[in-house]
Image (spheres, rainbow, N blue to C red):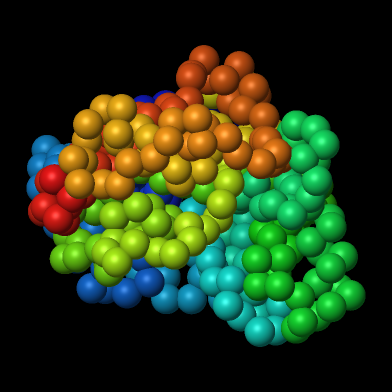
Amino acid sequence: MPAISSRATVLVTGANGYIGVWVVLALLSRGYSVRGTVRSPSKVGVLSDIVSRKLPDAMARFIGHVVPDITSPDAFREAVKDVDAVIHLASPTSISIADPKDAIEPAVRGTTSILASVLGEPKIKRVVVASSISAIASASVAPTRVYTEDDWNDQAVQIVEEQGVDAPGLIKYEASKTLAERAAWAFIEEHKSEATFDLVVVNPSLVYGPVADDTLASPDDLPITPGMVWNNLFARPAPREREPKVFNSVDVRDVKDILVSALETEAAGGQRIIANSQISTWDEWVLVSQELNLLRRLERVDPEVAKRHPEHLFFSNEKAKQLFGMEMRTIRDTMKGTVADFKSRGWLRHLE
C-alpha cells in the first residue's frame, strides 16, 4: 500500500496510554489529524488538556472518541469512519488473571474487532498494531540464539493449553499476545480478497523512558513500565531484589518513532517489526546515573559487577534499523530522559 500522507487522519486507540500520548503528540507535530480513543469521557478531557498545553496550535486537529469496551464486536465501528490509517495500541495488560481465557479472549477480540471495523472502510490504507516481543519468544527460553520476526512464542500457548489456570501469570500474558497477533494475521489472510488496507505489527520489548503525560500527581500514577523503573531505582526504601534481573528494553521515544514510521513507510506493509534496544540489568542503569552524576544520593555500584549479567535471549532490531534508517537509544539515553522527567515533577529531591 502507498505511504500515508502527513495530511491524513489517523485513529489512535489507547491514545491516553504511556505509548499512546507520545504517538498522538508525534502525529500532530507532523501535521496529521488525530482521533484518539479512550475508555471514558473524563479521559478525553485529560488527553485534550495535554494536547492543548503541549501543542496548542494542533488542537483543531485532535478529537477524542470514547470506546468503553474494546472487545465489543462493534467497538470501533464509529471510530474508524473517515480516517485514513489506524495505530492500534489498546490492549489488556494484566498478568494477574487466574483463568487464561480472561486474558486471551479480550486480547484476541480487541484486535479482530478493529480489523473487522476497518474492513468496511475502503478509505483506510494501513493498520499498525502494537504487539510485544512476548509474541516472539518467552523470557524463560534458553538464550541459544538471537530471536527475529520469524519466531513465534508457541511455547507459551502450549504451556497454557496444558496447565490452564495453573500456568504462570507471565506465560498467560505471553500466550494472549501471541494468539492476538496470530488472529490479526489470520484475519488479513482470510479477508485478503476484500481488504483495501495492509497490516504492520510492531513488537516492542519492555518500554521505558520519560512520560509524556504531564498530569500525573505522583509516582503512584505512573504507567506499568515507568512504574517498574521508579520501584526498582528511585523508591525508598529500596527493594531487596530488583525484578526482572536481566531484560531487553527499548526507549518509548523509539517505539513512538517506529509506530509513526510504520505508517509512512511503504515497505513496512505486511511486516512484523521488533522494537528493541539492548539487554541490561538494573545495576547497569544505576551505573549510568553514577557515570553521568545524575543523582548524587543514588547508591553506587561496582562498574565491573554492574556490567556482568547472566546470558539472556536477545531480540534483533535489524529490521527496524534497515526499514527506517534509525539507531535505537541506549539505556544511557533512557536513564537521562527518565531522570530529567522525574526531576521536573519534583519526585527525585530525596536523591539529589
Q: Is residue 341 above or below residue 171?
A: above
308 vs 108, left or right, is left
Q: Is residue 237 left or right of 244 when viewed as pictured? A: left
Please provide percent x and percent y for residue 188. 74, 48
Q: Residue at x 70, y 39 (%)?
A: 311
Residue at 69%, 45% in the rendered image:
195
Task: From the viewer's side, name the closer residue of 106 and 1.
Answer: 106
Locate the N terminus and report the quarter of the image it occupies: top right
Q: Is residue 153 above or below residue 9?
A: below
Q: Is residue 83 visible?
A: no
Position above or below: 261 against 249: above
Quadrant in the rendering for residue 100: bottom right
Q: Quadrant of residue 254?
A: top left
**Residue 297 as seen in the image, left or right of residue 233:** left
- Report whether 36 appears left or right of 280: left
Residue 130, image x, y percentages: 56, 48
Residue at left offset 84%, top offset 68% = 159
Seen at 29% across and 61% down, the residue is 235
Asked whether residue 320 appears in the rendered view, the answer is: yes
Position of residue 265 measured from the top left corner of the image (x, y, whole percent): 54, 23
- Give the mark count: 0
Residue 142 vs residue 197, the one in the foreground:
142
Residue 80: percent from left, percent from top: 47, 55
Vertical placement of residue 286 versus 121, above or below: above
